[in-house]
Image (cartoon, rainbow, N blue to C red):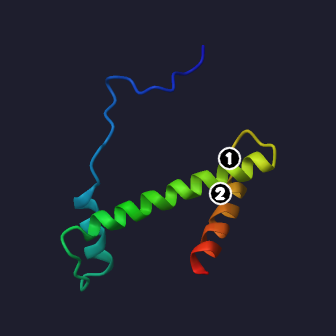
Amino acid sequence: MAFSTTVSQKQRIRRKAPRGFLKRVFKRQKPHLRLETSGDLLVHLNCLLFLHRLAEESRTNACENKSGIIKKDHVLAAAKVILKKSRG
């Protein structure tokens, strides 16, 4: 029997950004850093967008290698491509 790809009613999907966690991490890493009130949300959004691009690029690499599974090598190659594109 195949596993269902839908989320059951018992599982809850988080809809909010973990603001308390993000603020705590910022304070630990950079205590002198002052962010505006919505700065943590922008960092969270940036992280989500990066993960989305990484997943798409990794899937493309896996398809090019005729692999049905995204492997570590596909993700590393995708990260290098994304870094090259963002730097110039």
Could you say where residue 55 lies in the image, as x and y percent from the top left? 58, 52
Dot 2 amino acid type? Val
Could you say where residue 84 lies in the image, as x and y percent from the top left? 64, 75
Please give the label number shown on residue 70: 1
- In this rendered view, identify the residue nearer to me: 29 or 46: 46
**Residue at image coords 24%, 59%:** 19
Question: To which quarter of the image does residue 23 belong?
Answer: bottom left
Q: CA distance from mark 1 to mark 2?
A: 7 Å
Q: Is residue 49 above or below residue 13?
A: below
Answer yes or no: do the residues labelled 1 and 2 have beta carbons within 8 Å? yes
**Residue at image coords 67%, 68%:** 81
Q: Quadrant of the C terminus?
A: bottom right
Dot 1 amino acid type? Ile
Q: Which element type, helix, strand or loop, lies under badge 1?
A: loop
Please give the label number shown on residue 87: none
Question: To which quarter of the image does residue 7 belong?
Answer: top left
**Residue at image coords 66%, 48%:** 59
* Residue 34 in the figure: left or right of residue 13: left
Question: To which quarter of the image does residue 45 belong?
Answer: bottom left
Could you say where residue 52 lies in the image, as x and y percent from the top left? 51, 54
Q: Quadrant of the N terminus?
A: top right
Q: Which element type, helix, strand or loop, lies under badge 2?
A: helix
**Residue at image coords 62%, 73%:** 85
* Residue 83 in the figure: left or right of residue 63: left
* Residue 84 in the figure: left or right of residue 9: right
* Residue 51 in the figure: left or right of residue 46: right
- In the picture of the structure, the residue carrying the numbered disc 2 is 75
Counting labels gives 2
- In this rendered view, identify the residue nearer to me: 86 or 15: 86
Could you say where residue 18 lies in the image, as x and y percent from the top left? 28, 55
Task: Name the residue at the bottom extreme.
Answer: 32
- In this rendered view, identify the residue nearer to me: 66 or 24: 66
